[in-house]
Image (cartoon, coloured by chain):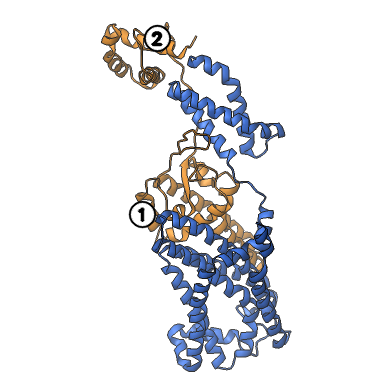
Chain colours: A orange, B blue
Amino acid sequence: METPEGIDLLLRPAGLVPRALAFAIDLAIRAAILLALFIILGMLGNFGIGLGTLLLFLVQWWYMVLFEVLNQGRTPGKYWLGLRVVHDDGTPVGWTSSLTRNLLRFVDMLPFGYFLGALSCLGHPAFKRLGDLAAGTLVVYRERPQARPALPEVEAAKPPFALSLDEQRALIAFSERHASLSAERRLELASILAEPLAVTGENAEAKIHGIARSLVGAP
Amino acid sequence: MKQAAFERQHHADWHDFISQLDALERGKPSPSQASDFPAAYRRLCQHLALAESRGYSSQLIDQLRQLALRGHQQFYRHRSPLLGRLLGFITGGFARAVREQWRYVLAASLLFYGSLLGMAALVFAFPELVFSILPPDQVTQMEQMYDPDASRLGRFAERGSGDDWLMFGYYVMNNIGIAFQTFASGLLFGLGTLFFLLFNGLTIGAVAGHLSAIGYHQPFWSFVIGHGAFELTAITLAGAAGLQLGVALVAPGRLTRAEALRQAAKRGIQLVCGATLFLLIAAFVEAYWSSMTLTSPMIKYIVGALLWLIVAAYFAFAGRAQHAAE
C-alpha cells in the first residue's frame, strides 16, 4: 500500500482464526451486557421490557459500529487479539463503512454459523469477508513496538572489500539477530563467509559483527 | 551518513513524534501538538525514505515504518462532527440520495406495492386465499387485533394503555431489523431482497384484503395509514438499497464486481440510514398515535394523508437549493 507521501506501508491482514476468536469474545461481552440489562430492567415491568428491547436493538446492531468508529477500529474482542479495522488504504474506519460491514454481517452468517463469511475469508488474499468486500475495509494486526536489539560488543572492523547495499543489509541483519540464533547456527552461517573475509571459521562471526558495527557506525 | 549518526541526529524528533501520536490516539492533543503534527509526519516519511534508500538495518526501518503507519492513520482520519453530518443528511442529503437512485426506488416500490395491492385484491375477491399465505392462528390473531370493539389497536392491544414503551421498543427492534436484513440480503445477487420485498408485500396485502373483506376495514386502515407513510416507504428504500447490491453483482458494467459492489454499498447505505430514521418515526407514530381510539377515524385518515403528503413533499423538494449551489 502506497501513501500520498510516496512511502510504502505494510498492513498485515488477520486470518480467519484470530477474527473468529475476537468475534467470540465480543459475543460473550454482548451476552453479558444483555443479561445484566434484562435482570435490572425486568424489575421495571413493561416499561423496562420496552427499554430493554430498544437496548437489545442497540447492542445487537450498533455495538460493533460504535466501538469500531469511536475506538480506532477496535472492539473489545479485537483489542484483546491485537486486531483493528481499517479502510483498504490504511485509514481508520468511518461511520458509513463500519455500518456497511456490520449490516452485511447478516449475510456472512448465512446459512449457518458464518459459513459464507468463512468461505469468503478463506478464499480472499486479504482474508476479507463479504461485508469487508462491500465496505472496502480490512482487519489487520495492530503494530506492536519492538525493542531494538543491541549489536554485540566487538572491535569495529573495516570490510576487506566494497559491499553492495544488500550485502551490507544482510551483515547488519545477522548481527542484529544474533541473540535469537543458537551458537551452532551462528557458527554455521558465519563460516559460509569465512573464505571471502579471509578469516578462519571460528573467527568469522566476530569479524562479521565488527563489520556490521563499522557499517552502522556504532561507537 | 552512518546509521548510528542518523539515529542520533533524529532521535529527538522521533521521540516527539511518538508523544504526539500518543496524544492524538487518545484524542486529546494539545493545540501545539496538533498544529505541528503534519510537518512532523512529513519529516518522518522523509526519514523513512532516506533510511530505506541508504540501506539502514531492517530493525530501524521497521521501527520507522510503524511510526509512519500510526501517523498515516491519524493524519488521514475521517473526522467530522457527527451531529452536523446527521443534520445535513436529514435536511437534504437523504432526499437527494433517494432522487439520485430513483430507478432502484421505483423498482423496489413496484415490487412491494404491486405484490401488496395484488394480494389484497385477490384476498378481497377470494377470501379463502388468505389461508394459503398466513397460518390460521395468525389470521385469528389479526382479527382480534383489529376488532372494531377493542379499545386499543395493534399488537399488545389487550395489555391496556401503559405499555406504549413496550410497543415502541418492539416496533423498533422488529422493523429496523427487517429493513437491515432486506438490505443485507441483497448481497445474495439481489435474491434475498426480492424475497423480503415480496414476502412482506404479500403478507401485508393478505392481511389488508382479509380484514377489509370481513368488515374490519375501518379500524385497520385508520390504524395503518398514519405510520404506513414512514414504514412502507422505509421498506421500499431498504429494498432499493438491497437491489443495488444485487445489480452491482449481476451486471457490474465496466467496473470489476468488487468495485461495483463497493460503490453500490456506499450509495445504498445512505438509503438504509434514512430508512432507519423513518422507521424510528414510524415506531413512534405507531406506538403513540395509531393505537389510540379516542380520536375518530376521520381525523386519523386526515392526519395519515397529511403524513403521506409530508413524506412525498420531502422527497420531492428537500435539498434542492443546496444541490443547485454545489
Residue A70: image x %, image y %?
60, 47
Image quadrant in which you'd find residue B194: bottom left
SS for dot 2: helix
- Measuring 68% from the left and 38% from the top, which residue is drawn there? B28
Q: Is residue A44 left or right of residue A111?
A: right
Q: Is residue B298 left or right of residue A31?
A: right
Residue type, label 2: Gly
Relative to A22, does residue B41 appear above or below in the rendering? Answer: above
Residue type, label 1: Leu
Relative to B226, does residue A56 appear above or below in the rendering? Answer: above
Q: Is residue A86 left or right of residue B30?
A: left
Marking on residue A119: 1
Residue B115: image x %, image y %?
48, 81
Chain of the residue that carries numbered disc 1 in the rendered image: A
- Measuring 28% from the left and 10% from the top, which residue is drawn there? A196
Q: Are marks 1 and 2 in contact (CB under 8 Å)?
A: no
- The answer to whether residue B153 of the structure is visible from this angle is no
Which residue is identified by label 2? A210
* Residue neighbourhood size for the residue with mark 1, other residues' Cα within 10 Å, grouped as few (<14), some (14–19), many (≥20): some
Chain of the residue that carries numbered disc 2 in the rendered image: A
